Amino acid sequence: MELISPTDFAKGKIESLQEYSALAGNSIVSLFGRPRYFADMIQQADLIGFGSLPIVVLTGFFTGAVLTLNSANSLERFGSLSLLGQLVSVGMVRELGPVLTGLMVAGRNSSGMASELGSMIVTEQIDAMRALGTDPMKKLVAPRVASTVIMLFFLTIISDLLGLVGGSAVASLLLGLDYRQYWSSAWQILKFQDVFMGLLKPLVFGFIISTIGCYYGLSAKGGTQGVGRATTQAVVASSVIILLVDFFITKFLMAMFGYS
């Protein structure tokens, strides 16, 4: 690993932040400009949405099941086992569903975007695209951003539902609770604030995943080794930023809705 001075390191990080901000802003502008590549958007939606469906289903189901198992012991000590459905419902909808789905999609698709675009960079396909008068931002970045935001929204809903199903299966089969009571309490505890918080996060996370994947892909250098580094950096950066942004979104929304 090459040693650099702290000043050069800070300058490089600030420059990267500026380049990422410019790409993120241009991706939003490109969504509203012409031409619009709907075919590419549908193709990306299929790759991102349906391609991620199996891992999202498994993650959601077993997260709800494990949350139920871990919470049952604590609630049983206080004679509040009937509140199990409420705990799983709030935990999945507000926090675990959006965050875990975002991390799964980041691991699968942010790396895919970085490797795909990085390969196009090192083989000069994007330069050829520019020479033919096609804007790579509109052709490559904008469809990925739009598809990721939309599909992550629906994937999170599926993950939340499967988490509740997994919790219900454990509660009824292993803990002997009545599944109707479980679903009744899980449904009644949810408020508008909980659902709003849980469905706003995937919109933000989807934008982060797609823009970071595209940024590292388009900034790849150094041949195939550079593509590999860009792929790794995209996954790490998107996962870390999702966790950081999740904290600030949760804090802001809790203050806005008056949570104590």
Image (tube, rainbow, N blue to C red):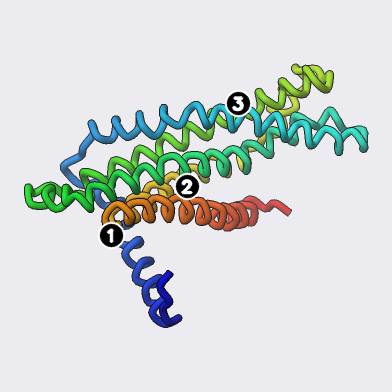
| Residue at the spot 62% in from the left edge and 43% down from the top edge | 95
Q: Is residue 247 above or below residue 108?
A: below
C-alpha gap between disc 2 and disc 3: 20 Å
* Three-letter amino acid code at the position of disc 2: Phe
In the rendered view of the protein, which quadrant contains the N terminus?
bottom left
Horizontal and vertical percent position of residue 111: 40, 45
Please state which of residues 75 and 234 is positioned toward the viewer in this rendering.
Answer: 234
Q: Where does label 2 land, which residue?
A: 205
C-alpha gap between disc 3 and disc 1: 41 Å
Sequence-first disc among 3 and 1: 3
Sequence-first disc among 1 and 2: 2
Please state which of residues 170 and 164 is positioned toward the viewer in this rendering.
Answer: 170
Q: Is residue 143 above or below residue 45?
A: below
Q: Is residue 94 left or right of residue 150?
A: right
* Three-letter amino acid code at the position of disc 3: Leu
- Crowding near pointer 3: few (<14 within 10 Å), some, many (20+)? many
Give the number of the mark in front: 3 or 1.
Answer: 1
Q: Where does label 1 land, which residue?
A: 221
| Residue at the spot 52% in from the left edge and 31% down from the top edge | 55
C-alpha gap between disc 1 and disc 2: 26 Å
Give the number of the mark in front: 1 or 2.
Answer: 1
Horizontal and vertical percent position of residue 250: 60, 52
Q: Which mark is residue 162?
A: 3
| Residue at the spot 67% in from the left edge and 25% down from the top edge | 166
Q: Is residue 196 visible?
A: no
Q: Is residue 103 visible?
A: yes
In the rendered view of the protein, which quadrant contains the C terminus?
bottom right
Sequence-first disc among 2 and 3: 3
